[in-house]
Image (spheres, grey):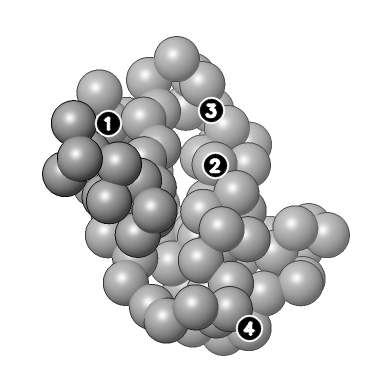
């Protein structure tokens, strides 16, 4: 389930946001709802997703209302073999 609350993006200073570049920060603190992040290897997708989770929780979204999924090339190969 995705967080169903509408949350206004609020600039805030947190160590997990300070580490992000402007594009990552924009994704991390965008309003609640489904979010798809597509980027190449080594671009900080995992860091961005973790910062988003922390931001959502800091905004009052219950952790059990958040779903995070990552798809790796190796997991796709494993699924094809099954």
Who's the residue at 67% across and 74% down the image?
20
Q: Earlier in the sequence, mark 4 or mark 3?
A: 4
Q: Residue at x 58, y 72 (%)?
A: 44
Mark 2, other Cα within 10 Å: few <14 / some 14–19 / many ≥20: some
Residue contact at pointers 3 and 2, CB within 8 angstroms: no
First reached walking from the N terminus: tag 1 or tag 4:
1
For mark 2, what is the residue?
53
Find residue 13 and report its image quarter.
Answer: bottom right
Is residue 25 visible in the rendered structure shown here? no
**Residue 17 shows in this picture:** yes
C-alpha gap between disc 1 and disc 4: 25 Å
Identify the residue at image location x=30%, y=41%. 78
Query: Which residue occupies the foreground of this view, 46 or 10?
Result: 46
Task: Confirm or deny contact between disc 4 and disc 3 (CB under 8 A).
Answer: no
Q: Is residue 62 above or below residue 76?
A: above
The answer to which of marks 4 and 2 sits earlier in the sequence is 4
Assign a secondary structure to mark 1.
loop
- The numbered dot on residue 21 is 4
Above or below for 18 versus 2: below
The image shows residue 61 at horizontal and vertical percentages of: 47, 27
Residue indicated by mark 1? 2
Residue 57, position as x, y percentages in the image: 57, 32
Circles 1 and 4, Cβ within 8 Å, touching? The answer is no
Viewer-side label of 3, 2: 2
Mark 3 nearby-residue class (10 Å; few <14, some 14–19, many ≥20): few
Quadrant that contains the N terminus: top left
Task: Kindly identify which residue carries mark 3.
Answer: 60
Q: CA distance from mark 3 to mark 2?
A: 11 Å
Which one is earlier in the sequence, the residue at label 1 or at label 3?
1
């Amino acid at each position: 389930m995705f967080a169903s609350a509408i949350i206004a993006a609020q600039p805030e200073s947190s160590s997990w946001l300070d580490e992000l570049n402007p594009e990552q920060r924009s994704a991390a603190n965008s309003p609640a709802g489904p979010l798809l992040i597509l980027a190449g290897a080594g671009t900080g997708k995992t860091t961005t997703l973790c910062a988003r989770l922390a931001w959502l929780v800091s905004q009052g979204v219950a952790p059990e209302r958040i779903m995070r999924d990552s798809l790796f090339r190796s997991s796709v190969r494993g699924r094809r073999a099954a």
